[in-house]
Amino acid sequence: MTARLIDGKKIAEEIKEELKTQIEQLNKIHSLVPGLATVLVGDDPASHVYVNLKIKNCQALGIASFNHQLSAETSQKELLDLVHNLNADPAVHGILVQVPLPKHIDETEVLLSIDPKKDVDGFHPFSLGKMVIGEDTFLSCTPAGIQQLLIRSNIETQGKHVVVVGRSNIVGKPIANILMQKNPHANATVTICHSRTPNIKDYTLQADILIVAIGIPGFITADMVKEGVTVIDVGTNKIGTTSTGKARLTGDVAFEEVSEIAGAITPSPGGVGPMTIAMLMSNTVKAAKLSIGLKPQDP
Ligand code: GUN
């Protein structure tokens, strides 16, 4: 392996240590305990794992968590009523409705019902619109985590060609927008490719920074990348179970062969995943601060 490993786990721990200090200060100076409400509808096993991880992280950092687990048969109205109650609850600074939601529920309507001041997932169209026009807002956690990985690994984006593979609302579209913004941690030229892009390799070979979120294990192979590229692998694909019954996960990048050519690379798992959680915690602290008139950077 020649590529430098971008250790998302370690960087996420650094961020969480910083947050812990900020939370202690909020307790001490303002008697404020940041609070996150999680809403999980149905029995999707992966969603349960993710939400439990979010709850555990809240506990470790001193964030209060309010957990709502609803049956798969929950009606649209019941879910909207819960969100309205959470909107009105002063102890709740952030609301996270885990997606995907069951098919009979209109996801857009639910996300629209969250108070944008509590939209720590950054999925509300109001937050997304502000992001597009370069205003301060809650950035969705995975793209915000990718930007932090680049910043904290000293990987320059300014003037670079970023190629994003994948166009989802929660990764591809927002990360492309974030990195094209006119600011020092962005200023990249961005190309988006997706499952219907013909000759995708023609684009990936041009990337200085390649961000892959297409959901196909090992999709990016060594012949598709240029020497020295930075590769951010967002994929977490389940490819079976371990002897202890845990899910075996792998990324969208053929890690072994691509790391012979890349300059820097994230592993998956252990790259972007831990950063998503760290940014959710960070957005929750930000929401709590804003709720009492502080600025995000205030102690
Ligand atoms: N499903 C997959 N990733 C996420 C996430 O970051 N937030 C929520 N709410 N649901 C998800």
Image (spheres, rainbow, N blue to C red):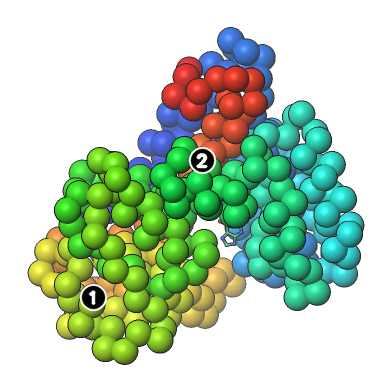
Residue 57 vertical position relative to residue 180 in the rendered view, above or below: above
Residue 190 vertical position relative to residue 154 in the rendered view, above or below: below
Q: Give the left or right position of residue 18, taking residue 157 as reference.
A: right
Give the x, y percent position of residue 75. 88, 65
Q: Residues within 10 Å of mark 1 (few under 14, many from 20)?
A: many
Give the x, y percent position of residue 270. 39, 57
Q: Does ligand 1 reach within 8 Å of label 1's beta carbon?
A: no
**Label 2 is placed on what type of residue?**
Thr
Q: Residue at x 69, y 63 (%)?
A: 108
Q: Which one is closest to the eye, mark 2 or mark 1?
A: 2
Q: Nearer the viewer, residue 201 or 33?
A: 201
| Dot 2 or dot 1, earlier in sequence | 2
State how far apart marks 2 and 1 are (Cα): 30 Å
Q: Nearer the viewer, residue 88 or 187?
A: 187
Q: Residue at x 65, y 43 (%)?
A: 116
Q: Residues within 10 Å of mark 2 (few under 14, many from 20)?
A: many
Q: Residue at x 70, y 43 (%)?
A: 115
Q: Give the left or right position of residue 187, taking residue 275 as reference.
A: left
Give the x, y percent position of residue 44. 70, 70
* Label number found at residue 204: 1
**Label 1 is placed on what type of residue?**
Thr
Give the x, y percent position of residue 154. 21, 44
* Residue lying farthest to the front in this orientation: 133
Residue 134 seen in render: yes
Q: Which residue has dot 2 on it?
A: 137
When asked about the image quadrant of residue 56, the answer is: top right
Ligand 1 location (quadrant): bottom right
Residue 267 seen in render: no
Question: Could you tell me which secondary element the residue under label 1 belongs to?
Answer: helix
